[in-house]
Amino acid sequence: MDFNHFRYINNTLHVENTSLKKLSKQYGTPLFVYSRQGIEQQWTAFNKAFKQQPHLICFSVKANSNIAVLNIMAKLGSGFDIVSEGELERALVAGAEAKKIVFSGVAKTSSAIKRALEVGIRCFNVESYPELDRIQSVAKNINKIANISIRVNPDVDAKTHPYISTGLKDNKFGVDINTAPQLYAKATTLSHINITGIDCHIGSQLTDTQPFVDALDKLLILKNKLQKQGINIYHLDIGGGLGIQYTNEQPPVIAEYIKDILVKLNDPQLEILIEPGRAIVGNAGVLLTEVEYLKSTAHKDFAIIDAAMNDLIRPALYQSYQEIKPITPRTDGVEKKWDLVGPVCETSDFLGKNRRLNLKATDILGVMSSGAYGFTMSSNYNSRPRAAEIMVDGDEYFEIRPRETFHDLFGKEQILP
Ligand code: LLP
């Protein structure tokens, strides 16, 4: 397995040129560490793969929304895919150009819609009839025109974990592709709505391009249908979802995936929007954690670590597997099979099970591929302050978010008078 910007130098895991041991000492654990080069490399791979095809990469902010991370991409000229007013404000503070922001999500509030119209975002990805009405009414009130695409549900099986599959008939997302023409027809009658595109997002952590190609096929059929209705489509938004290698998966490389899309598209004029999240930041991040105790029972060997499901919920929520590496592999002792469990009082609080590792208390471990859906899904459960985040940039590194304090935890709560 190759975690490109992570490698051992003198028996210590480094990210770029920076020792993770040094960072764990300086900032403590649990600690998220990201590689700027790793992020830039993946973003650039998407950008280059499109060649001459008009396109806009809209990084999916939910995957990693630290403003330093967003700013790195804003500087590269990235667009952003947001799903809330909070994500909109983050993206703007991070230097995003409003005209490169697309707004997805099934429950856009009136306040978020208003703010998005005021700053002039690129497009709303509309997910239902009532949402279209709401956008029309907010836009009319403030006398703005809303660009929209309709998120259609192409009913293709993304063949991924059911909780992160979004393009099936019985998912809450989007509008049935067969009835979408009626919604488009309605949109043409609304005074403050301007139709610009078609959108879809079929799921996350896809390891095969076929479902993407099948979905695109259906979007192209819809586009032709709409054109016959006299409705012009200027862009297709193909969503995010390209998977990464956590262990033995073999997802297509970015260039191959985009090539397959462009071959199917076969239209060098049409603009493609794409909303990758995980594929850009996933393997650019690690979660560092320290072994607190080793606890053996008659049945199991537990390594109790200081990171928990509140820091990284993916294993508990999706039974997902993330590689766990020693920061300084031991040369003494022997390997054993460990369950790596956190301090939270839940049986689902584990980051790895049955991992062959040679461990002692105080060892530092790295939970790999934690750059996406790590910090953004973290919580304060069990009154645990959220971890700090560090960005490594070659020989330099920056604390891009300090560890939360107890004041951050409950400083705004009030005891009754
Ligand atoms: N666009 C839309 C509309 C989305 O809902 C998502 C992800 C993306 C783009 C980005 O997908 P990506 O390229 O990152 O696969 N928490 C889960 C993943 C949830 C994905 C939700 N939507 C996990 O940790 O696996």
Image: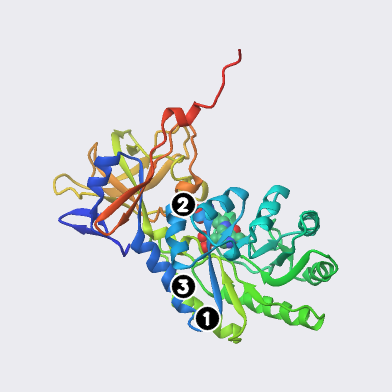
Secondary structure type for disc 2: helix
Query: Mark 3 or mark 2, which is nearer to you?
Result: 2
- Residue 249, image x, y percentages: 42, 65
Which amino acid, mark 2? Ile
Nearest the viewer among 323 and 281 is 281
View quadrant of ligand 1:
bottom right
Q: CA distance from mark 3 to mark 2?
A: 21 Å
* Quadrant housing residue 42: bottom left
Q: CA distance from mark 3 to mark 1?
A: 13 Å
**Disc 1 designates what residue?**
260
Secondary structure type for disc 1: helix
- Looking at the image, tell me whether mark 3 or mark 2 is earlier in sequence order: 3
Work out which quarter of the rendered image holds the C terminus and state it. top right
- Residue 60, image x, y percentages: 53, 60
**Disc 2 designates what residue?**
67
Which amino acid, mark 1? Asp
- Residue 356, image x, y percentages: 29, 50
Nearest the viewer among 28 and 412 is 412
* Quadrant housing residue 37: bottom left
* Circle 3 residues within 10 Å: few <14, some 14–19, many ≥20: many
What residue sits 35% from the left and 37% below the top? 306
Report whether 275 appears left or right of 10. right
Which amino acid, mark 3? Phe
Secondary structure type for disc 3: helix
What residue sits 45% from the left and 41% below the top? 309
- Residue 122, image x, y percentages: 63, 65
Q: Tell whether circle 1 marks a residue whose Cβ is less than 8 angstroms from ligand 1.
A: no
Mark carried by residue 46: 3
Residue with the most extreme top position: 417
Residue 102 in sight? yes
The answer to whether residue 61 is above or below residue 77 is above
